[in-house]
Image (spheres, helix red, strand yellow):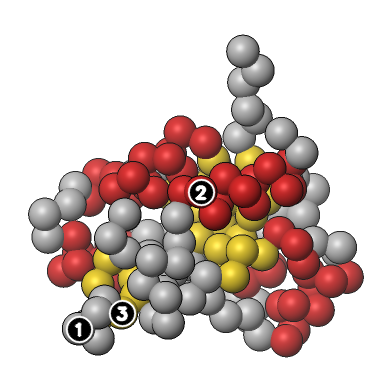
Amino acid sequence: MIRKRKIKLYLDVDGVILGKNQRGEIALIPNIEEFLIYTRENFDCYWLTTHSRHGSDDGVKRHLYTFFKGCDLALLKHIQPIEWETKKTEAIDFDSPFIWIDDYLFDSEINVLKEKRCLKNWLKVNTYKNFHGLTVERLEEKRKEITGY
């Protein structure tokens, strides 16, 4: 059996793991537990969100706490905070294979990805528009596209 090498996964929060349900309320995506277990087993995970911008995940935990009723917050332990100042691309390790899941990038961030020939590494997901838009299957497809295995 070939063991998949873990690649880096950069994960936004709002519009990615939090979206709008059918009642128009902000909520965790329906498959959050499956998604987090999959990412724990297959990726080196980092928060790339304004909620952890200064290298601490306290803001992410505070932001997500009310949404995790009935879910185990320990499922987030494998996701590390990462520091950046102006553009999220400052935090990305371009020397390693990665996937960046985000609902919206600024033009300046898209330009950095283009310059680094990494635009394909962005998995655009907007769970405000499509609550079921982030799935393990979509992430697995992107992983295969990036790594070839």
Q: Which corner quadrant holds the N terminus?
A: top right
- How dense is the environment of label 3, judged by Cα within 10 Å: few (below 14), some, or many (20 and up)? many
Numbered label attached to residue 112: none
Q: Is residue 126 left or right of residue 34?
A: right
Secondary structure under badge 1?
loop
CB within 8 Å, label 1 to label 3:
no
Above or below for 44 versus 41:
below
Mark 2 and mark 3 lie on one chain; the one further toward the N terminus is 3
Q: Which residue is mark 3?
A: 20
For the residue pair 111 and 126, the one nearer the viewer reads as: 126
The amino acid on which the numbered mark 3 sits, given as a three-letter code, is: Lys
2 or 3: mark nearer the eye: 2
Q: Can see residue 59?
A: no
Q: Position of residue 50 (x, y in %)?
A: 46, 75
Q: Amino acid at mark 1?
A: Arg
Disc 2 marks which residue?
137
Residue 80 x/y as whole percent: 46, 50
Q: Secondary structure at mark 2?
A: helix
Which element carries disc 3, helix, strand or loop?
Answer: strand
Q: Amino acid at mark 2?
A: Glu
Q: CA distance from mark 1 to mark 3?
A: 8 Å
Q: Mark 1 = which residue? A: 23
Q: Residue visible at 52% across and 36% down? A: 42
